[in-house]
Image: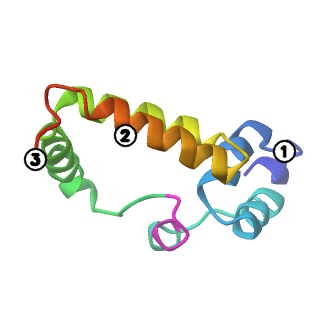
Amino acid sequence: PGVKIGLFCTTPSVELGRVMPTKQAMEMLLTGDLMSAEQAVACGLINKAVSPEKLRDTTMDLAAKIAQAPSETVAIGKEAFYRHLAMPDITAAYDFAKGVMVDNRAAPDAVE
């Protein structure tokens, strides 16, 4: 509820402002209103909404799918993704990403 009890949710705003549209994040932060799971999916705050009964199976299915990829490749991709997101210049982000792709080609798992 944050703002409703006189406390602006400054730390949650860091993540909200990066994962959902600015206007929706600001509305949520300024009103303290909660959103439904469906609304959270629609604005990109979460990937999918499932019932509590399906949560474990859904999570394990996603983890198994990710685990099928080589762990070194996943690690390279995760690090590169977050690093290029932090770059304010898209040209620099592309240059960085190209370098990572070239380096990744040298990995033992990088075969077609």
* Residue toward you, 109 or 22: 109
Q: Is residue 4 left or right of 42 when viewed as pictured?
A: right
Q: Is residue 65 above or below residue 32?
A: above
6 versus 37 height, above or below: above
Taking the spot 71% from the left edge, 48% from the top edge, the residue there is 89
Q: Earlier in the sequence, mark 2 or mark 3?
A: 2
Element type where label 1 sits in the image: loop
Q: Residue at x 11, y 40 (%)?
A: 111
Q: Position of residue 79 (x, y in %)?
A: 45, 31
Residue identifier under label 1? 8
Camera sees residue 35: yes
Residue type at mark 2: give it.
Met
Q: Amino acid at mark 3?
A: Glu
Residue 7, horizontal then vertical, whole percent:
85, 41
Q: Mark 1 near mark 2, Cβ–Cβ under 8 Å?
A: no
Q: From the image, tell me which residue sits under label 2.
A: 101
Estimate how packed mark 1 is, as few (under 14), some (14 to 19) or many (20 or more) residues with alpha carbons within 10 Å. some
> Is 104 positioned to the left or the right of 97 in the image?
left
Q: Nearer the viewer, residue 92 or 46?
A: 92
In primary-sequence order, the first of circles 3 and 1 is 1
Task: Classify residue 47 as left or right of residue 8.
Answer: left
The reply to whether callout 2 and callout 3 are in contact (CB within 8 Å) is: no
In terms of secondary structure, where does tag 2 sit? helix
Q: In the picture, residue 11 is in which quadrant?
A: top right
Where is residue 81? Give x, y as percent.
Answer: 47, 41
Residue 111 drawn in magenta: no
**In the rendered image, the vertical position of residue 92 relative to residue 54, given as above or below:** above
Return the residue at label 3.
112
Disc 3, disc 1: CB below 8 Å?
no
Range drawn in magenta: 40-45
* Picture quadrant where residue 106 is located: top left
